[in-house]
Amino acid sequence: MSKKQGLWLGMTVLATILSQPVQAAEKVDLARAEEIVSGRCFLCHGLEGESASPIFPRLAGQHWEYVAKQLGEFKSGKRKSDTMKPQSEELTSAEMKALGVFFESKKASARPVKDAELMAVGKYVFNRGNQFSGLPACASCHGTKGLGTPQLPRLAGQHPRYTEDQLKQFNSRERNNDNAVMHTVASKLTELERNAVAEYIATLD
């Protein structure tokens, strides 16, 4: 393959990747999504997915595929939640996708650093894990900026309390709808590491 052909192929792949969110948006009813958000979702997650309460996740900037998957699993009962099951039961798959695209289009915001020393611990664990306990780095799956993938959630900017709660649920197997690797990861975190990494994640943008 020539250099020119390689460049053309690279540009084609990049254009395809960049067009995916647009293509997804073209196939959903965003007006319907906004109606659902303003009618019910905003009470916990905010109109822009910003979630003022630390016990509810921030959805702004989250991958639409991940949002749609979680809604489907709340509806089926695979992911257990007394709050989300009744909220998702009447949603169609098209509405779940539309809600995902709606929230992904919103701008996520980071939290300012509050404790520099705790941040240092969290940053270390997030990027390097803990070789002494066998804890893998969070960044190895979620990326160095915590942006995740369509299959793995965006963590950047998430409420520390919510992140900690989910890690505890993975550890206790109360949450088992997602990657089973998280059960092992959560079980290896000390209380300090869990708190520190949650606080660090909140500062990522």
Image: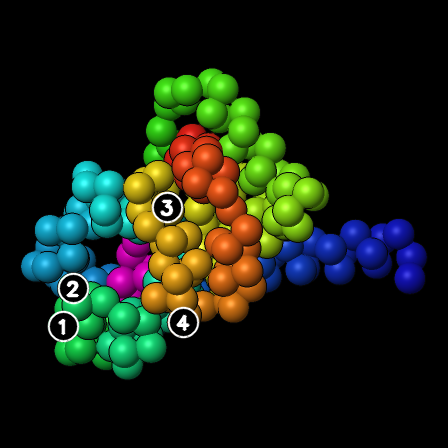
Identify the residue under disc 1: 86
Q: Assess disc 2: are there few (<14), some (14-19) or many (≥20) residues with their C-alpha within 10 Å of its C-alpha.
A: few
Residue 164 pos. (x, y %):
37, 46
Q: Which residue is rendered at x = 41% and y = 52% of the image?
A: 167
The N terminus: image quadrant: bottom right
User: Considering only vertical position in the picture, is 24 above or below 118?
Assistant: below
Judging by the rendered image, the residue that carries numbered circle 4 is 177
Of label 1 and label 4, which has the lower sequence position? Answer: 1
Looking at the image, which residue is at 46% across and 35% down?
A: 192
Q: Residues within 10 Å of mark 4 (few under 14, many from 20)?
A: some
Q: Is residue 163 left or right of residue 46?
A: right
- Which residue in the structure is indicated by mark 3? 164
Mark-to-mark CA distance, 3 and 2: 18 Å
Q: Look at mark 2 in the image and give the residue it sits on.
A: 83
Q: Residues within 10 Å of mark 3 (few under 14, many from 20)?
A: many
The image quadrant of residue 13 is bottom right
Separation of marks 1 and 2 at Cα, in angstroms: 6 Å
Q: Count of labels shown?
A: 4
Say if mark 4 contacts mark 3, CB within 8 Å.
Answer: no
Residue placed at 58% from the left, 38% from the top?
125
Which label lies toward us, 1 or 4?
Answer: 4
Image marks 2 and 4: residues in contact by CB distance under 8 Å: no
Callout in the foreground (1, 3): 3
Q: Amino acid at mark 2?
A: Thr
